[in-house]
Amino acid sequence: MPDPSLTPAKPALPPVHDSPVFNGPGRTERFGVVLGIDLGCADSGMVVSREVRMPRASYVITNAARHVIRLAKSGEKIDGLVVWGSEADPTMHPEFREITGNLRDLRNKWFAKATLWLASDNPRVDEAVQRHAIAAYDKAVVRFDWGTAKTFAAMTGKKSTEFNNLCAHLGHLENLVLTLRLGRGDTDNTTDAEIKAWVKKAAELKPREVHLLNPESKSKKLKPVPKARLAEIAAEITEKVGVPAKLFAADTLLS
């Protein structure tokens, strides 16, 4: 029997500290068991600058490695990594491309079968560098609640001319997943005309999937969509866009 003192010690797993940037791993309705990485978190304690309240790339990359390596070496299984933003869109991070490349390398090395997700409500697609980074994800889940420029302007407060620009850039993404949050409030995006316009635009964008959300709301101004109408919308999307329209109850990503 070898002398225990001569037996090499197993390398210690990297320590993982509590951080609002990292969530989980936990089970979600939409993505399975995932580790969430919040690039829009302003409370990490390690922000880029006074002006840019987003976690530093070095902080994200180092701690993501610690989390992923610990999970892999402890034998835990995850279905994916989800990059998102709680207070700012992840694509607005000044080092988004660098972070994305490192996360993809980590995934490839430690969880090759896991999906690398990007969740974006307001994607920065006007620059080629950002679009290239978005394309590095297996699936880019993008909010798309509008079928027309008029509805886009009413729901976002942006100029209606930005709608066509957004669509033009999204159409180049082969990993696109569209999220449609349905709601009957000050602006109703569930009318026959609006859904018809949405379906037409989605067919042009050619997403890989469509996620339909019908979130509950305590506001009297926002009425829920009846189940029968939901079924009609899902069937129309599936038939005319040619991809499955999946209905989810939870509005939040990591639940």
Image (cartoon, rainbow, N blue to C red):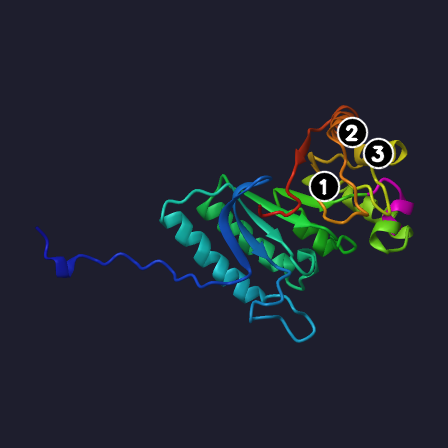
Q: Which residue is mark 1?
A: 179
| Circle count | 3
Q: Which residue is denoted by mark 3 in the rendering?
A: 195
The numbered dot on residue 6 is none
Q: Secondary structure at mark 3?
A: helix
Q: Which quadrant of the figure has residue 49?
A: bottom right
76 in magenta: no
Our reading of the magenta stretch's main secondary structure is: helix
The circle on residue 229 is 2
Closer to the chain start, of discs 1 and 3, is: 1
Q: Are marks 3 and 2 in contact (CB under 8 Å)?
A: no
Can you say which quadrant of the picture contains the C terminus? top right
Seen at 55% across and 50% down, the residue is: 104
Q: Which residues, given as a range, are shown in magenta?
A: 146-153
Closest to the observer, 2 or 219: 219
Say whether disc 3 or disc 2 marks the residue closer to the N-terminus.
Answer: 3
Q: Earlier in the sequence, mark 2 or mark 1?
A: 1
Residue 226: horizontal and vertical position, in percent?
76, 32
